[in-house]
Image: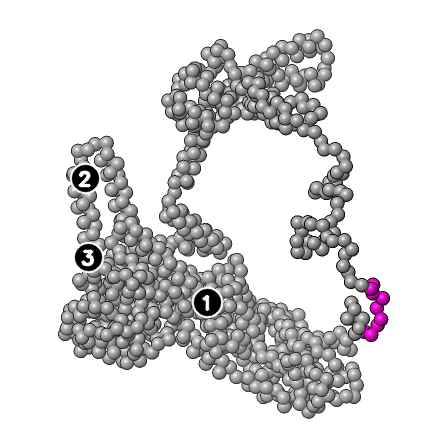
Amino acid sequence: MTDIAEILGVKSAPQPIGNNKPLLPKPHSDLTGSATELPTTVPTFVRIGNRQINPHKPARKWTWAPFSSSSRPDGLLLNHWVRANVEYPDYPYARFDIHLDPVQYTIEEYKAWLTSEDWSQSETDTLMEYARIFELRWPVIHDRWCAVCPPRPVEDLQHRFYTVAAKLLQRRVSHEAALETKALEAVAADSNAEDPKLLLETAAARSLASSDPQHQPLMQHLGTGTSNKVFDLAYEKERRAHWEALWNRTKEEEAEELALRNELKQVETQLRKLKKRGAHVVAANGTAASRAATPIPAPEVAVQQVDQAMATTAPTPVPGVPYLQSARLVLPATGGETGISKALVARMEALLAEMNVPSTVIATKRACDLMDTVRRDALTWLLLEKQVIQREGVLRARRLKLAKMGGNIRVVDEETLLGIAPPPAPRPKPVTKAPAAPAATAAAAAPGKAKAPVSKTATGSKPAAKKPAATASSSSTTAASTGAPTASTATSSIDAKTKKPAAKRKRKSEDAPPALPNAAPSSGDVASTINTKPKKKAKPGTTKETSSVSTSVAPKAPPAAAAPAVTTQKENSPKKE
Amino acid sequence: MTEGNNASSSETRLENTIVCLPVATGSVAFYLGNKSDTQTHEWTLYVRGPSGEDLSVVLEKVIFQLHPSFAQPTRELTEPPYEVTERGWGEFEAQIRLIWKDPSEQSVLLSQPIKLYPPGAPLTAQQQLQQSTETPVVSETYDEIVITNPTESFYQQLQSIGTTPSCQELYSQHAHFPTYSDTQVCQAMLQAQKLVNEHLAQTKQNLIQLDHDLANVEEALRVQQDEVRKKAARKAAQQPTKTPAPTSATTAATTSTGNKKQKTT
């Protein structure tokens, strides 16, 4: 403060003269450090929470007194601190000691209504006693029961108890209803009045009295926690069995169940979509039997779908109503009725843009026609690609299942493909497959397929003739060329072979010696080794080859035995380029 | 007249015939300078044959529907040049209705916006001042009218369009008319089509293969499941009676090896 005054050049208030030494020496205190600067004052009020305590008043008196609780049957005396001059009539927590009313029956009642073949009277009595003592806490009752009597499952105990209670209640209600009818009828006879309430009551009482006890309306006897409806034993047993099964599921079973549920969801959505378009009849006809023999329904279904979608927005030619050519350029409708989604149409547009096709063209007839066909083909292709992916997924799942069940299928997992785990012993002979479907790895054309190795093996080429084999090898090389030049990948594909598969290749090249100078058959062999039929063991070495082609494993020194094959492969690839 | 009408309406229509009549509608707008606020541009709205064809052979009349702020917004023209020239300041959408000589054909409604300013972002103040009075703003739309199964006489009229001399010169703005060619676009689309078809063929083959594989795996799965079920049934049968144990074990062994043999072939 004083320095500010100095800076500002203002004269501050006159300061007291002298130093600030206290007149008396400080008394000894335990306070040290900064605490010594604090003034010691005696607080006038004590504050606890939000209550203030006046310290001048005397404190309350408490005594150590004995007490007993009304809820205790034995009158035990314990001591506790209580306020001195206050009267405590009862232990304050005795009011929480509540019990269910016991279900009781006389021996006559038992003999009349409650006898049973499985249960003796003593057992029933014990059960009732336990139920009363343990307040219908069935796990405890069951436990105590099994310690004393021949063991029964807990639902049997429950069933017996609730049946007894229900029958008792039913009989008693009927009995009382009979009494009441008599009384009311007597009153009605006396008064002879047409009181509607009285009439109703008599009618109600009479019906209750005369009806079968089983047909009484539900009445709950809240005091005992029972009712006049019998416990459903069958349902309870089933429920418990289900619960046990659920509890004892293994992790695998749980996973399987989840997978099945997801599959069900997918199938249901597909079915719903098909039903909306009315195409479920078509889909149902495409059974496994007809699939191999008749033309594939899947592309046809896709074509139908696309046609339907395009037809929704295209103008329909009507005689006498001319339309504009530009109306044919409108995009197909997306949504629920058509199987075409917005995303699919967007992908089609993107595809066309990639191929330098403008989104709108001049409205001449041939331009519109071409645009139409190009869009249709693109949509069909995209739809079929989706189906291919779906089916690959299904195929993979089925193969895994088959392998698990112990079928003769070798499912190659990622580890063996990447050469991490040792490959199993290879089979001696490569197998040729009759239908020469030169299914190229078009899956590679589709962008970014993660499960490339397995899918490639699934769609591997079948060698039968030179031409398909050639296309297969070319396609395998084109597949590889996503990123790496073909020659180097061809070599790496050979290089990446470890000794075992190299030995196998050697055997193969021996198998087809006369055909060696000709590039195609050996490449056909190479192609044949890509073959994985579910019934035969897959050749992991060759699957390794394709996978290494895709994952570009670092090349290893090729053994000399593989040299002829190497040269032929190299020969082959420049040819194909 | 009525007889004439009757004759044309009862006239038989050709079957499986489509006639595409090319038609171009557009607007040409000139900036007039800073003379007035309400008449900054002079524009011409027109309908023409793209290669200068004379459309009056098939057109009864053309009705231009302008913005209601214009006097007599409905303009009817019965012979080429089918154009309307006006002065104004605002852009709007004009409707053009083509009425055919054949009364059984429905009239066609075309919509053509009048563009006074070049496309893109609105002009800045500077750009507005710099507008030239010489270069027009041309906005034209090419379209084709597709007529399905026309009557015989109408068909003849449509066919005769190409033979009449060009009336392009009649249009006041014919100097600014653009020309059209679809060859480039068609070429691009043909190439695209080829590519897509290749992909499509490949995918179809894929699908065939996948279906085949799937059928095989399903078959194998079914066989396996049957086997498992048989084994379970056999085991259940074994337990109460002990004697058939060795025979059933051997039968189980033989059937399983038999299955394996089947699969290895």
Q: Which quarter of the rendering shows the C terminus of chain A? A: bottom left
- Name which of mark 3 and mark 2 comes first in the sequence: 2
**Residue type at numbered disc 3:** Thr
Q: What crowding class fits label 3: few (fewer than 14 Cα within 10 Å), some (14-19), or many (20 or more)?
A: few
Q: Which quarter of the rendering shows the N terminus of chain A? A: bottom right
- In the depicted view, which residue is nearer to us: A490 or A144? A144
Question: Cα distance, mark 2 to mark 1?
Answer: 57 Å
B11 relative to A391, above or below: below
Task: Tell whether position A10 is magenta.
Answer: yes
Marks 2/1 same chain: no
Q: To which chain does the residue with label 3 belong?
A: B
Q: Which residues are magenta?
A: A8-17
Mark on residue B28?
Answer: none
Which structural element holds mark 1? Answer: helix
State which quadrant residue A233 falls in.
Answer: top left
Are the residues tagged 3 and 1 within 8 Å (C-beta)? no
**Residue type at numbered disc 2:** Ser
Q: What crowding class fits label 1: few (fewer than 14 Cα within 10 Å), some (14-19), or many (20 or more)?
A: many
Marks 3/2 same chain: yes
Which structural element holds mark 2? Answer: helix
Mark on residue B248?
Answer: 2
Mark on residue A379?
Answer: 1
Q: Is residue A319 left or right of residue B195?
A: right
Q: Is residue A200 left or right of residue B163?
A: right
Question: At x 53% / y 74%, what residue is drawn?
Answer: A359
Circle 3 residue: B265
In the image, which is nearer the foreground, mark 3 or mark 2? 2
Question: Cα distance, mark 3 to mark 1?
Answer: 41 Å
For the rendered model, the colour scheme is one colour
State which quadrant residue A458 falls in.
Answer: bottom left
**Residue type at numbered disc 1:** Leu
Question: At x 40% / y 27%, what residue is drawn?
Answer: A153
